[in-house]
Image (cartoon, rainbow, N blue to C red):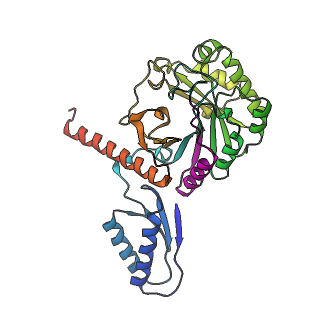
Amino acid sequence: MVSISVPAQPRSAESMAFSVVLDLIEGIGRVPTGRTVEVRLGEGDRDAALDIVSAWCASSGNEIVSIEGLTVTVLHGRSPDSLAGLDPGQLPGSRVWVYTNFDCNLACDYCCVRSSPKAERRAIGVDRLKQIAGEAAAAGVGELILTGGEPFLLNDIDVLVNSCTEKLPTTLLTNGMLFRGARLERLRRMDRSRVILQISVDSATPAVHDSHRGSGSWAKAIAGIRIAHEEGFRVKVAATLPADQMHELEPFHDFLDTIGIAREDQVIRALAHRGVADSGIELTVDSLIPEVTITADGVYWHPVAADHDDQFVTRDIFPLADAIAEITRRFVAHRRAADSIAEWFPCA
């Protein structure tokens, strides 16, 4: 949220309102659709000034969402019915994903973005990531999520992560297999109070996990979880399972309990038919709630399709607020179209 203070000096209501409207125009131009701008009125005829501000909001397509004393909060755009029912964390731009790189020490047979030891690196780089983190914080993003590829293949991963945690809480996705030597030292240089490690484990025993990710990878991932805990990091575990196994989760949850992963940190998702996967659920722009995702090539609709043209949004990463606004606009349009179709073709 952008906050603007108007100097508190005696003025007419019209003069006060005109000044506030100019500040609102400036502030709303700096935030994406769906975010708010806060202005504080100066002394004067508050009610008359608010009438003018309300009229401007109505004519400009924006919305006053709260008035507390002399503080007025204005939403950029209107609260669309198309976003009703979403949790705050599901709104586009509530968090931003960044692919740090695409090369990986593993070649998982269902990788959604075709990462492998042979994949081109396509690194985001420190300078761009610093700018992303700064603009994300300014745009009201609540969390950054860094993924790959395998981020710990990057010799500057600690610098990358710390450039993010200086601005926002950050989650770092990894296979957890490389925590030794110089890479362990890079892990130790990260801010434990601001970064969460999310490590991939697909089963409670090695067979299933290793069949997809490579022989010995399960044991190394479990060892990585142990090291991360010993180093004082909060650890999440993410599993990818075929859709027909999503109902058989309790034994897996019980196993994750035994290795110190809290239930709220156990992320289990269905296999998606993306990347090199030859089966899985079909995920399209129409069926996915978007999560703003940035790669070295541009902005994508969702991290599960950050290597696919059908979910490519724009090559222009900056201004990041504009990219978030564009994804929000498209999402609202998709939802409204779906609602309209439902009205035209009722089931009963």
Is residue 241 on the magenta stretch? Answer: no
Question: Where is residue 288, by image quadrant?
Answer: top left
162 with respect to 129 (left or right): right
The residue positioned 67% from the left and 19% from the top of the image is 217
**Mark count:** 0
Question: Where is residue 190, by image quadrant?
Answer: top right
* Residue 62 in sight in this render: yes
The residue positioned 48% from the left and 62% from the top of the image is 30
Q: Nearer the viewer, residue 274 or 206?
A: 274
**Percent of width and height locating residue 55:** 33, 72
237 with respect to 318 (left or right): right
223 with respect to 31 (left or right): right
Q: Which quadrant holds the C terminus?
A: top left
Looking at the image, residue 146 lies above or below residue 60: above
Is residue 135 on the magenta stretch? Answer: yes
**Percent of width and height locating residue 103:** 60, 29
Question: Where is residue 260, by image quadrant?
Answer: top right
Q: Which residues are magenta?
A: 120-145
